[in-house]
Amino acid sequence: MTTTLWEPTTVGALELPHRVAMAPMTRSRATPEGVPTPLMGEYYAQRASTALIITEGTQPSEDGQGYILTPGAHTPEHVAGWRQVTDAVHAAGGRIFIQLMHVGRISHPDNTPHHRQPVAPSAVAPAGDMFTAAGMQPMPVPRAMSTEEVTATVADFAAAARSAVEAGADGVEIHGANGYLLHQFLSTNANTRTDGYGGSVENRIRFAVEVATAVAEAVGPERTGIRISPGNPFNDVSEADTAELYPALVAQLAPLGLAYLHVAHGGDDDLLRTLRAAWPSTLLVNRGGAEIDARADDLASGLADVITVGTLALANPDLVQRLRTGAALNTPDQATFYGGDSGGYTDYPTLEEATAGPADVEAPATPADSAQSTDQDDQAQREQTRPGGGPALD
């Protein structure tokens, strides 16, 4: 395995000891009020040897919640809960960014604290059903956001970023991918607006740029990252102009001096090379479904500065040690991805635990199987929203 994986680098003001980071993944273990729990602190601290932990999507407001038992970052109780998590990660020597995710139309009134209609760029319902306490229900037609609400939502992101840093996070990642609110504004089917936020590429990228600008001003650009997923149709979004859209977006983001751009890569290497050339700081790439050596090739070629992995880190708390030594990998248990207790969450054995007692770990998955790390990457999970409220792993 190439040594490039193990070279140090930087993200913003953070020094990273190597280049294997943990991708954001919804796990649905917060309280019903969205408060992060001590169990979540244990889970993330177990994985502190990754170069950077990017947490599960965290709603910046009540409107931002779509799934059951996902954490928030907009009340004092949320801040206190996240403080337990960040303290645990830092005590274990790790680094942690909290991902801020507003789901937009990918929601249901039964899943939000205020039980109101979801909001979105336009009143266009997504295809598909949502898991709720009453079972699977069709996702409703959302309410189109007024211009004033768009402005207020930008402020919500900035306030949530301040809360995350107050809670001890090293920074925040803005979720602009996988069919959620920012991606809905970028799309040509979920966004049918006729004001300054719809229509042309320039207008459709406006909201994402405003959010990134506000967050960077709130907590510092060195503490701010953003994630995109060019061409990803997940959550029923489409882009008629992907090849034009994302270079335009990156051109507007580049002058902000953000800590990083995180690309959930859908396979268009030409577009990735274009974005790489346009992005002046650290580039994180999640190439789902690829073996670690293939992902490391992105580092060697300069296409990526850091790679992110999802279920590899989910199932292997000591992933870095296993990759360094070529050890076998635990098999991810898909039945416990979303909701529940410590089972399939904090009880995956480390190498030391697996060798100290009876051989109770399943046969390792192949790298190609275990590298399914995002919504975009894990097709099998896209088609079943599990009890506990999570989407396909993100």
Image (tube, rainbow, N blue to C red):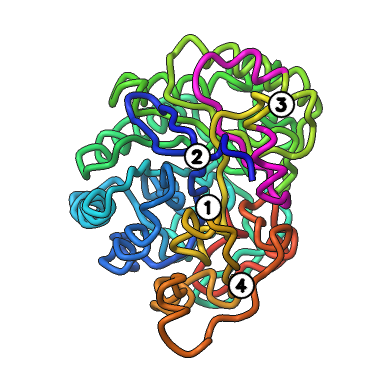
In terms of sequence position, does the residue under pointer 4 or pointer 3 come before the other? 3
Mark 1, residues whose alpha carbon is within 10 Å: few (<14), some, or many (≥20)? few
Going from the N terminus, do you reach mark 1 or mark 2 first? 2
Mark 2 / mark 4, whichever is N-terminal: 2
Tell me, for residue 272, which label it has, or none.
3
Q: Amino acid at mark 1?
A: Arg
Query: Against 91, is 274 above or below?
Result: above
**Distance from the alpha carbon under mark 3 to that under mark 1:** 27 Å
Residue 139 to residue 363: above or below: above
Task: Report the residue marked by disc 1.
Answer: 324
Q: Earlier in the sequence, mark 1 or mark 4?
A: 1
Q: Locate residue 304: give its quadrant.
A: top right
Q: In which quadrant of the rendered view does residue 171 lie?
A: top left
Q: Amino acid at mark 4?
A: Thr
- Cα–Cα span, label 1 and label 2: 8 Å
The local secondary structure at tag 4 comes to loop
Give the alpha-carbon distance from disc 4 to disc 3, as whole Å: 30 Å
Mark-to-mark CA distance, 2 and 3: 23 Å
Front: mark 4 or 3: 4
